[in-house]
Image (cartoon, rainbow, N blue to C red):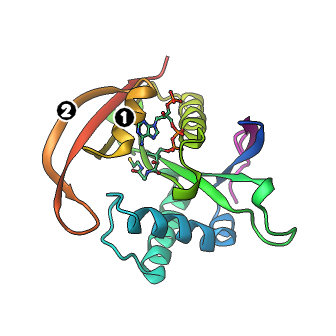
Amino acid sequence: MKVALSTDVATSRIRSQAYTITYLNTSGSILTHLPQLCLILQDCVNEGSSIGFLAPLSLLEAEKYWTQVAETIMKGNLHLFILTTSATSPGRDTPPIILGTIQLSTIPKATHLHRAEVIKLLVSPSSRRLGIARKLMEHIEDFARGTGRTMLNLDTATGSAAVEMYRRLGWEEWGICKDYASWPDGSRCDATFFRKDLV
Ligand SMILES: CC(C)(COP(=O)(O)OP(=O)(O)OC[C@H]1O[C@@H](n2cnc3c(N)ncnc32)[C@H](O)[C@@H]1OP(=O)(O)O)[C@@H](O)C(=O)NCCC(=O)NCCS
């Protein structure tokens, strides 16, 4: 059983709405939120985001992905957070609706312990432009700082909304790799690479 960290739950407000960011660091907690995690992943892929999957993304494939995430988390090289709002919670006994999620991937090499990669920042298509990604990015930067990281890296599809968002959040764009990945329809896309010093 993993030790609970101070980042397990953090509540803040976005446009007067209360939001909670929760650290999912056990297989059980991921299982609890599995249907919602699958839904946000499917929604983002199926609306055209290049995040590692072709569309249409089936529920089975989505479940397989989150199962692999759970396994990697248990090895200690991955950290997963979800952002939920109690206002959309369907009831006491059902898990709250996930509006956003983000992961931090650490590199288990002695020469890479100062840095980590931000991956799979996903905001539900119906909850965009509300500041949810900004909240998740601020949270994961604080978390990374707390684990002694001094630099973060990420890459995203060139031409996507995320490129402008990372610029707005103060990330340094350092290069573009042509034909790095594919859009969900299978056509090639370039990737834009970013870095950020954690001061
Ligand atoms: C990219 C994404 C995460 C943005 O999430 P979001 O919650 O809508 O972003 P926020 O509302 O927190 O916006 C943060 C900043 O980025 C800017 N921004 C967000 N979306 C933007 C867009 N489509 N065009 C231009 N700027 C944008 C906002 O203006 C905001 O800056 P401001 O606060 O100074 O106004 C969301 O569109 C998404 O999930 N896309 C699909 C998945 C994806 O591509 N993820 C990135 C993988 S690396």
Residue at the disc numbered 2: 175
Q: Are marks 2 and 1 in contact (CB under 8 Å)?
A: no
> Looking at the image, can residue 80 be seen?
no
Question: Which residue position holds label 1?
Answer: 164
The residues colored magenta run 1-14
Cα–Cα gap, marks 2 and 1: 14 Å
Q: Amino acid at mark 2?
A: Gly
Is residue 15 left or right of 69 when viewed as pictured? right
Foreground of the two, 74 or 161: 161
Query: Amino acid under label 1?
Result: Glu
Which residue sits at x=55%, y=70%? 39
Relative to 56, does residue 168 appear above or below in the rendering? above
Q: Is mark 1 within 8 Å of ligand 1?
A: yes
Q: Position of residue 28 (x, y in %)?
A: 68, 69
Of callouts 2 and 1, the N-terminal one: 1
**Total tally of numbered discs in the picture:** 2
Q: Position of residue 179 (x, y in %)?
A: 13, 52
Q: Quadrant of the N terminus?
A: bottom right
| Residue 152 in picture, x, y percent from top left | 41, 32
Is residue 97 in view from this perspective? yes
